[in-house]
Image (spheres, rainbow, N blue to C red):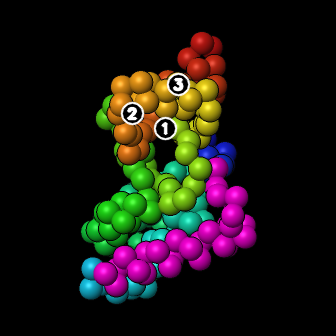
């Protein structure tokens, strides 16, 4: 798997990554309060790991990184579910038979993903031209889109060159 930075699109309003992290923590705290739940040390550690990640991470990645702090796989699973439910985190579809990965998505600029079916690397991309075509098609069909997601599956440069060698 590529060790390059995968997460590249962040809101321009934030005071760097720390400003964004503060906003995410506030939104998660508010969601938990609405649900009658607490922001436990374990949930906070999971959010912190996601916020510091340079790549999309799997449930297993999070578990491995935090099991030394006494955080179990079930806690990671439940916390990811809560983060998805409050729309702070989004799941990136894995290649066939692969493992789902997650990214903090709240208030980040819209982007799509190129997913390598060999190594699982994910590249974030923005396609303004495609967005314009989608908007026009929706207008022409009197369709009100709420959200969408594009994930293109193929081989990254590294895996493609290995395959051809």
N-terminal of the two: label 2 or label 3?
2
- Residue 155 image position (x, y, % from top left): 53, 24
Please state which of residues 121 and 152 is positioned toward the viewer in this rendering.
152
User: Residue under circle 2?
Assistant: 95
Labelled pair 2, 3 in contact (Cβ < 8 Å): no
User: Residue under circle 3?
Assistant: 133
Quarter of the view holding residue 79? bottom left
- Residue 36 image position (x, y, % from top left): 27, 85
Q: Is label 2 in a helix, a strand or a loop? A: loop
Instruction: Give the magenta-colored segment's residue range.
Output: 9-34
| View extreme (top): residue | 164
Disc on res. 120? 1
| Magenta portion: prevailing SS class | helix
Query: Image height check: is 141 above or below 53?
Result: above
Residue 80 appears left or right of 153: left
Number of numbered discs visible in the structure rendering:
3
Residue 60 appears left or right of 36: right
């Amino acid at each position: 798997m590529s060790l390059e930075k995968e997460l590249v699109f962040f809101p321009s309003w934030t005071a760097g990554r720390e400003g964004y992290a503060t906003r995410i923590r506030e939104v998660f705290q508010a969601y938990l309060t609405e649900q009658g739940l607490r922001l436990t040390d374990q949930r906070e550690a999971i959010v912190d790991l996601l916020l510091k990640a340079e790549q999309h991470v799997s449930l297993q990645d999070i578990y491995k990184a935090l099991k030394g702090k006494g955080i179990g796989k079930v806690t990671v699973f439940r916390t990811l579910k809560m983060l998805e439910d409050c729309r702070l985190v989004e799941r990136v579809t894995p290649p066939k038979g692969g493992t789902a990965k997650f990214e903090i998505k709240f208030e980040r600029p819209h982007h799509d993903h190129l997913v390598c079916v060999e190594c699982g690397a994910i590249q974030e991309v923005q396609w303004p031209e495609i967005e314009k075509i989608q908007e026009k098609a929706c207008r022409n069909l009197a369709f009100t889109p709420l959200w969408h997601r594009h994930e293109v599956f193929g081989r990254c440069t590294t895996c493609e060159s290995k395959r051809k060698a």
